[in-house]
Amino acid sequence: MLRYAIIEVDNGMTVVEVGEDQSAEEVAVRYGGVVVDPGPYPTFEEASEALMALPDEQDEAEGR
């Protein structure tokens, strides 16, 4: 069963699939990124909603 996690790579944050035999950290390393939220989220939609709720760099720079 697939699970989903949120990682950050050079061009921003994204949702990735995490297989049963993988950890979020392993997938992040494969993409050259770091784990932001390991979840695990059961659906892509839930992970996407969580990603949208995270503050982005512009929000942090503006003090939001």
Image (tube, rainbow, N blue to C red):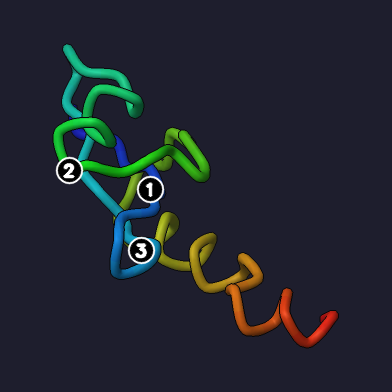
Q: Which residue is mark 1?
A: 7
**What percent of the width, then of the height, locates residue 29?**
24, 31
The circle on residue 45 is 3
Say which label, 3 or 1, has the lower sequence index.
1
From the viewer's perspective, tell me whether residue 30 is left or right of residue 54. Answer: left
Specify whether 7 is left or right of 51: left
Residue 16 locus on image (x, y percent): 24, 48
The residue closer to the viewer here, 16 or 8, is 8
> Are circles 1 and 2 on residues that touch, CB within 8 Å?
yes
Which label's residue is closer to the chain start, 3 or 2?
Answer: 2
Callout 1 crowding tier (Cα within 10 Å): few <14, some 14–19, many ≥20? many
Residue for point 84% across, 80% down: 63
Q: Give the number of the disc on residue 31.
A: 2
Q: Mark 3 against mark 1, which lies toward the viewer?
A: 1
**How far separated are the C-alphas under marks 3 and 2?**
21 Å
When asked about the image quadrant of residue 54, the answer is bottom right
- Residue 50: x %, y % from top left: 54, 60
State whether residue 39 is above or below residue 59. Answer: above
Report the quarter where the N terminus lies. top left
- Which residue is painted at 82% across and 81% down in the image? 64
